[in-house]
């Protein structure tokens, strides 16, 4: 029987995997998980998954060289997300371990979160609600409609495209910046340089992937290019934004405010020094935390495990040409290098 270990702890399994996917996975083999409220560590995985064939990987812990080298039977790592930066791919290649990722299933969830924070910031909903909860009488402030406002989207991928459709439905003007995306000529979306997008937008949503090319993409000079009445939103990754520069931009009033669902704190959450700022609306990395989004990616891992057991190469596989251990364990036919 195939031995499968989920690196999720109890909370992660409940929120990011779900009962349906877990039950289907248990029908495929001997399934275990980190049955604890504590965050899973490398040592936990090494101790509990030593004889396992497949890891189904949450974002923590990192699937690094030390971990993989300590699991002699490990043939595949199925990441329950698109982002595989927590996996040492070079080591996986060297050991012949197959790495797979999930397909994007969180586009609607994150895009709706962005619409929600735009409305909250534009109408001062969060600030007024916080004042009432604290027992203070809030000062009524003039808001603005999304209708007629300009949204700039940095990164026109799954989330960006879904967001553009939602924003258009609200009557917004939509600008996008993405050197790798093709915008159809008859689309309502207008491609712009990053400089023009920042200068023209009332709201700027950062949705580009975290790569070496996009590291520190948004810094003080970029905030200086924005309108002082504009709002910045980061729903991608902390690495794209210089957080100290963002703090300075907020303190100096270079932008009206920002919304953050990601940051450099634990588990990709916004750090308290930013989240507690009066011009910030922050949430603890929950943009994609909906049953629909979580189940989509969990079910991808179920399908990938099932394919492996049937001797089929699952999609999307990242390093199939190097997966010699997976080939030997499951009888896969691998592409030629």
Image (cartoon, rainbow, N blue to C red):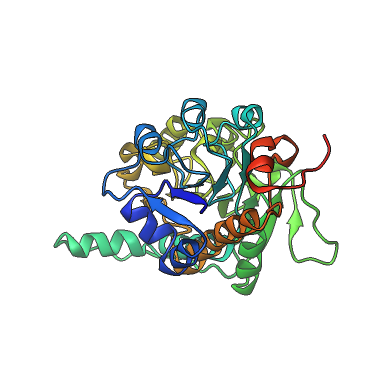
Residue 324's spot in the image, x, y percent? 69, 36
Q: Is residue 175 left or right of residue 293?
A: right
- Which residue appears farthest toward the left when viewing the image? 135
Residue 123's spot in the image, x, y percent? 41, 65
How many circles with numbers are drawn on the protein? 0
Which residue is depicted at the point 35% across and 41% down? Answer: 40
Residue 75's spot in the image, x, y percent? 58, 40
Which residue is depicted at the point 77% across and 47% down? Answer: 333
Residue closer to the observer: 76 or 332? 332
- Which residue appears farthest toward the front when viewing the image? 1
Residue closer to the observer: 58 or 35? 35
Asked which quadrant contains residue 272, the reply is top left
> Could you tell me if residue 229 is visible in this image?
no
Which residue is depicted at the point 57% across and 52% down? Answer: 205
> Could you tell me if residue 328 is visible in this image?
yes
Vertical arrangement, residue 67 with respect to residue 276, above or below: above
Which residue is depicted at the point 62% across and 74% down? Answer: 169
Placement of the C terminus among the 4 image quadrants? top right
Q: Is residue 294 left or right of residue 319?
A: left
Residue 281's spot in the image, x, y percent? 38, 52
């Amino acid at each position: 029987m195939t031995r499968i270990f989920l690196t999720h702890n109890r909370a992660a399994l409940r929120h990011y995997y779900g009962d349906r996917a877990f039950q289907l996975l248990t029908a495929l083999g001997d399934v275990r998980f980190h049955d604890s409220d504590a965050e899973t560590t490398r040592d936990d995985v090494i101790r509990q998954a030593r004889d396992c064939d497949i890891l189904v990987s949450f974002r923590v812990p990192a699937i690094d060289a030390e971990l993989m080298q300590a699991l002699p039977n490990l043939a595949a790592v199925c990441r329950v997300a698109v982002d595989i930066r927590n996996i040492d791919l070079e080591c996986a290649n060297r050991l012949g371990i197959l790495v797979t990722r999930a397909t994007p299933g969180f586009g609607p969830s994150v895009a709706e979160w962005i619409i929600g924070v735009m409305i909250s910031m534009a109408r001062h909903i969060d600030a007024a609600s916080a004042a009432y909860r604290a027992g203070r009488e809030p000062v009524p402030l003039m808001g603005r409609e999304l209708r007629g406002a300009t949204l700039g989207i940095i990164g026109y991928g799954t989330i960006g495209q879904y967001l553009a459709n939602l924003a258009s439905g609200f009557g917004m003007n939509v600008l996008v910046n993405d050197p790798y995306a093709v915008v159809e000529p008859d689309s309502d979306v207008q491609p712009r340089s990053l400089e023009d997008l920042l200068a023209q937008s009332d709201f700027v949503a950062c949705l580009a992937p975290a790569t070496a090319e996009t590291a520190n993409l948004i810094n003080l000079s970029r905030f200086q290019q924005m309108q002082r009445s504009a709002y910045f939103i980061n729903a991608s990754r902390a690495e794209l934004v210089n957080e100290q520069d963002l703090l300075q931009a907020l303190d100096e009033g270079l932008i009206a405010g920002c919304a953050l669902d990601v940051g450099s704190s634990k588990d990709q959450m916004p750090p308290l020094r930013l989240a507690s700022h009066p011009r910030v609306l922050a949430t603890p990395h929950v943009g994609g935390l909906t049953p629909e989004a979580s189940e989509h990616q969990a079910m991808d891992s179920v399908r990938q495990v099932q394919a492996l057991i049937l001797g089929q190469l699952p999609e999307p596989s990242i390093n199939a040409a190097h997966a010699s251990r997976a080939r030997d364990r499951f009888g896969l036919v691998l592409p030629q290098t």
